[in-house]
């Protein structure tokens, strides 16, 4: 049970760090509204996560293997799909909203 709680905490910590990174990148990019954000800006923000260093996250050193923008469909909004792993061997797949 302790191992499960520890893994859940690590995954939550990484998800929080990724979301914070997106929000920070969004505010650095300027005060773009959802309507004025271009597809290329969304792609750039998503792909920037691939090079972001999460190796120093306490108790959850993380490596991002890929980050790609998945276009919206009639049934789902656009999202940034991220794959990676949390040390030592927990695989992650996250689908973060492309726009906040």
Image (cartoon, rainbow, N blue to C red):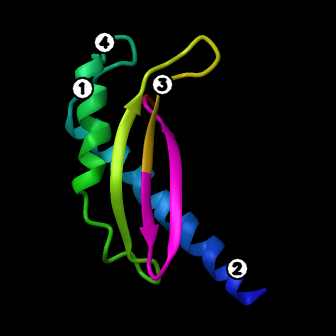
Do the residues bearing badges 4 and 1 touch, measured as CB atoms within 8 Å?
no
* Image marks 2 and 1: residues in contact by CB distance under 8 Å: no
Q: Is residue 2 above or below residue 49?
A: below
- Per the rendering, the mark at residue 41 is 1
Label 4: which secondary element:
loop
Q: Nearer the viewer, mark 3 or mark 4?
A: 3
Residue at the location (27% across, 41% down)?
47
Q: Earlier in the sequence, mark 2 or mark 3?
A: 2
The CA distance from mark 2 to mark 3 is 31 Å
Q: Nearer the viewer, mark 4 or mark 2?
A: 2
Residue indicated by mark 3: 78
**CA distance separating discs 4 and 2:** 41 Å
Residue 42 image position (x, y, % from top left)? 31, 28
93 in magenta: yes
Q: CA distance from mark 2 to mark 1?
A: 37 Å
Query: Is tag 3's residue or tag 1's residue first in the polypeptide sequence?
Result: 1
Report the span colored magenta.
83-98
Other-residue count near label 2 (Cα within 10 Å), few / some / many at <14 / 14–19 / ≥20: few
For residue 68, what is the image quadrant? top left
Query: With respect to residue 27, does 41 lie above or below?
Result: above
Label 3's element? loop
Residue 58 lies, in percent from the top left, at 42, 81
Q: Which secondary structure, mark 1?
A: helix
Q: Which residue is mark 4?
A: 36
Give SS at disc 2: helix
Q: Disc 3 or disc 1, which is closer to the eye?
A: 3
Q: Indicate left or right for 99 with 53 as reference.
A: right
Please give the residue where the numbered disc 2 appears in the rendered image: 5
Q: CA distance from mark 4 to mark 1?
A: 10 Å
- Give neighbour class at mark 3: few <14, some 14-19, many 20+ (Cα, 10 Å): some
């Amino acid at each position: 049970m302790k191992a499960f709680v520890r893994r859940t905490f690590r995954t939550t910590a990484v998800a929080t760090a990724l979301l914070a990174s997106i929000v920070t990148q969004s505010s650095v990019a300027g005060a773009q509204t959802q309507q004025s954000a271009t597809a290329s800006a969304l792609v750039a923000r998503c792909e920037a996560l691939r090079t972001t260093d999460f190796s120093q996250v306490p108790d959850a050193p993380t490596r991002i293997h890929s980050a790609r923008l998945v276009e919206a469909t009639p049934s789902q909004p656009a999202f940034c799909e991220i794959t990676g792993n949390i040390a030592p061997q927990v695989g992650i797949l996250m689908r973060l909203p492309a726009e906040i």
